[in-house]
Image: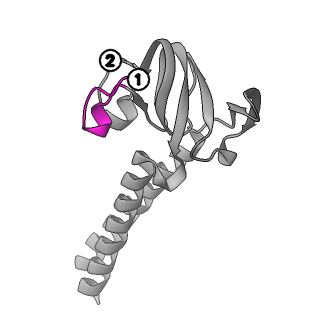
Amino acid sequence: MIIANAILNVYQKIKSLKIIRSFAQILPKLTTVRRNNGREQQIPTSHLVPGDVILLQMGDKVPADCRIISCQNLKVNNAELTGESKPVKCTINTSNENLLEATNMVFYSSLIAEGNGEALVVATGDQTILGEFFQDFKDKIIEILFRYLKRSC
C-alpha cells in the first residue's frame, strides 16, 4: 500500500513538473528592445538581460520582470501570477512596497491587456518572481520524493 501511494505521488509530481515546463511555451520567441542609442530591434527573448529596455503593446506576453518607465493607458493581466482576473492599470510611479502589488511593475508571463509602454528589464529566467516560485516548487517536490522513497525502502 505504501509503495502504491508513493508511486501515485511520484506520478502526480512528474505531471506537475510537465506543467511547469509548459510555461516555457508561454514566453514569446521575439521581443522588441531599444538598444544601441535608442535603435529598436527584435531579439530572441532568451537574449534579454537586466537593463534592456523593452517595448510593450496590447496582446504581448511580458518576457521578463520589468519596471515601467513610460506608458499610455497600459493595463496588464496578472492572472497567471496573482489569480486576479481584472487587468491592473500600470503607472510609472511606485504605488506599493509589496512588489506584486506595485503598479509600476510587470511580470514574466503577464498579458498586456490594453495600451502600450516601455519597461526596464529587472529579472529574467529563474530570477523572475515566477521563476523563483517554480524553483522553490521543484525543490519541494524533490524533497517530498526523497521522503516517500525513504519510507518505502
Marks 1 and 2 in Cβ contact (< 8 Å): yes
Residue 8 image position (x, y, % from top left): 33, 66
36 vs 17, left or right, is right
Residue 125 image position (x, y, % from top left): 54, 51
Decide which of 138, 126 is in the foreground and name it. 126
Disc 2 marks a residue whose amino acid type is Lys
Placement of 100 over or under 144, stated as above or below: above
Q: How far apart are the alpha carbons under marks 1 and 2?
A: 7 Å
Mark 1 secondary-structure assignment: strand
Decide which of 63, 7 is in the foreground and name it. 63
20 vs 36, left or right, is left
Among the 4 quarters of the image, the one containing residue 13: bottom left
Which residue is labeled 1 in the image? 77
Residue 46 image position (x, y, % from top left): 66, 47
Query: Which label's residue is closer to the chain start, 1 or 2?
Result: 1
Name the residue rendered at 26%, 70% in the picture: 5
Placement of 47 over or under 104, stated as above or below: below
